[in-house]
Image (cartoon, rainbow, N blue to C red):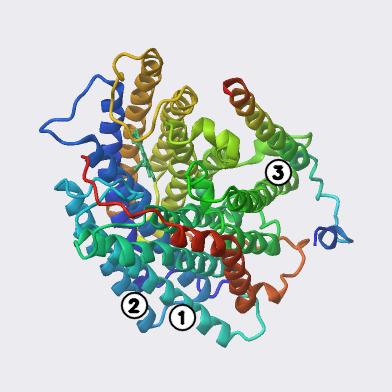
Amino acid sequence: MNETLKVDRRDAKLALAHIYVAFIALALGGLAGLLQTLVRSGKFTLPANISYYTILTTHGVLLGLVLTTFFIIGFQFAAVSRTAGTFSDRVRFWGWIGFWLMTIGTAMTAFFILIGEASVLYTFYAPLQAHPGFYLGLTLVVVGSWISGFAIFAHYARWKKEHPGQVSPLLTFMAVVNMVLWLVCSLGVAATVLIQLLPWSLGLVDRINVLVSRTLFWYFGHPLVYFWLLPAYMVWYAIIPKIIGGKIFSDSLARLSFILFLFFSIPVGFHHQLMEPGIDPFWKYVQVVLTFMVAIPSLMTAFAMFATFEMYGRSKGATGLFGWLRKLPWGDARFFAPFVGMLFFIPAGAGGLVNASHQLNQVVHNTIWVTGHFHLTLATTVVLTFFGAAYWLIPHLSGRVMTKAMNRLAIIQTIVWVVGMTFMSGSMHFAGLLGAPRRSAFSTYGNSPQALEWIPYQIAQAVGGTILFIGIILVLVIVTNLAFFAPKGETEFPVGEVAETAERTPLAMENWKLLIGITVALILIAYTIPFIDMIQNAPPGSKGYKLW
Amino acid sequence: MASEKIKGKATEDSNLKGTLASVFLLGFFLIFTWVSVYFLFLERL
Ligand code: HEM
Ligand SMILES: [Cu+2]
């Protein structure tokens, strides 16, 4: 399984380049996040006529799209190179082309947001209309990511050819599933941008079919969250067992859960559109059922994690029902940060089941509850796992080692994040249940009693946001140290081994014709009829608006 | 698939009682949250 123990230096440079951009995005986006919570507390106004929505768009795009995509692609390049062997020059060359396209696209997008020409939020909902440069920049980001995806596919194909009849390395397989998922879903966002938004923003067409553009966005937008989550699951399934000194509970279970994510994370976009008129309730219902199916692989993951930890603890002599918890390496930030991420996925997942239920969605839709929800899933579970991975990945790639002091700082960083996020996300959830809207600058809405109820929660959000910003500074200190200043040396890239008791992995799990065939079939079932309906029975389209 | 995994290969250290308890606790928490918001929904009907 371990063809090379170390990522080749040339591949390491490619992975590191992605990770640097990711953390620069974290620095700028984190600052925007802090400003948002301060504005929403009502005690602070932005200087120089800067719009709240410009800051909010900067935050959402930099953290939701740039930080994630760059970290994920960098991490996956490293993981594939480590487990399926060093890249060929051609694969690496295309990896760099992908990187530069994404980086130029990001710079372009950021430019148009910051000059105030694109405050359309990271979901760029029509009929809000941005400058064409914003859409072009995002197109470059997506095309760049496709090129990197194909580079990974090519490397995987070569491995399969050189190892006929063998099961591919787990991490490589997972990276391939994630890039297939990304490719299939980002076709939707590419379609709305190239066919609808760009011509409309260039003035070539006057009006846009809003419902179609939102549907294409959410066809992309939900699998997007699994594109963020699956790399975290890669760390949990395949890397954490090695870090704690245990074994992977089951290779087939891990692969099966990834396959289920591929099947069920795409045909579910309507759960973001439950309150949208113009979609037949029957099709909303079908997609809600599929949404509950996609909870299954996450529940499988929870089970596999508990089992990994318990098996390890018991092998170290733990007794009692929960004695194994005490055997885990709490002082190791490579374990602690992702573990806390896992814990936060429990309330995050519970909130997700609420969001996905049609009636309960009426309670929380477009309230700040939703923002609280994805700051648990994305900004805690995924992000803390990425931080935990960065603590060994960056020194592995930069040829350095993490010192004890930095490890301690990383533990503190995790605790700071927990405290800040508990305040911020907790108060977002409660304020949301009381009806406070998301994506809104401070307002008392003419001193309406309901809006006045929200203010204490908004102050708590600002307290949490400030603590979180300290957390961002700490992680940036650690990451800069690991990349440039830590002592030189060798750091392990941990890759778990499968427990002897586990069953052999069936080769059918890599039958891509079958896997992609089922994926496409489910998409066609869930979307064809309602989509035709949206086009045939469309109301007149909408002109563009710039409301900021 | 699950039954395949269990058959035969169990050894004495494959005691997963804590895992069973944990997944039950997780399930109860999910149900509790869902039902809480459901009652809020009913109250506001
Ligand atoms: C210092 C840490 C952070 C703070 C204080 C913060 C604060 C906020 C606030 C207050 C909002 C919503 C405002 C509104 O709806 O009016 C928001 C939105 C958002 N945040 Fe964060 N956040 C932080 C970190 C993160 C991280 C790490 C991520 C992702 C990795 C993230 C992703 C997002 C996204 C995608 C939105 C939605 C933007 C939109 O609605 O268009 N945030 N954040
Ligand atoms: Cu979703």
* Residue A446 vertical placement versus A378 (above, below): above
At label 2, the amino acid type is Trp
At label 3, the amino acid type is Gly
Q: Which residue is mark 1?
A: A154
Does the numbered disc 3 mark a residue whose Cβ is under 8 Å from ligand 1? no
Q: CA distance from mark 2 to mark 3?
A: 44 Å
Circle 2 SS class? helix
Which quadrant of the figure contains the N terminus of chain A? bottom right
Quarter assignment of residue A96? bottom left
Q: Residues within 10 Å of mark 1 (few under 14, many from 20)?
A: some
Left or right: where A368 falls relative to B28: left
**Residue at 45% over, 68% down:** A183
Query: Looking at this view, is A28 or A308 the one in front?
Result: A28
* Residue A511 vertical placement versus A174 (above, below): below
Task: Name the mark on residue A313.
Answer: 3
Q: Position of residue A535 (x, y in %)?
A: 44, 61
Which quadrant of the figure contains the C terminus of chain A? top left
Q: Position of residue A152 (x, y in %)?
A: 45, 74
Q: Position of residue B2 (x, y in %)?
A: 81, 58
**Residue at 75% over, 37% down:** B24
* Residue A422 vertical placement versus A545 (above, below): above
Left or right: where A113 falls relative to A121: left
Q: Nearer the viewer, mark 2 or mark 3?
A: 2
Mark 1 or mark 3: whose residue is earlier in sequence: 1
Mark 2 or mark 3: whose residue is earlier in sequence: 2
**Residue at 30% over, 49% down:** A127
Chain on which label 2 sits: A
Q: Are marks 1 and 2 in contact (CB under 8 Å)?
A: yes
Q: Which residue is mark 2?
A: A94
Ligand 1 sits in quadrant: top left
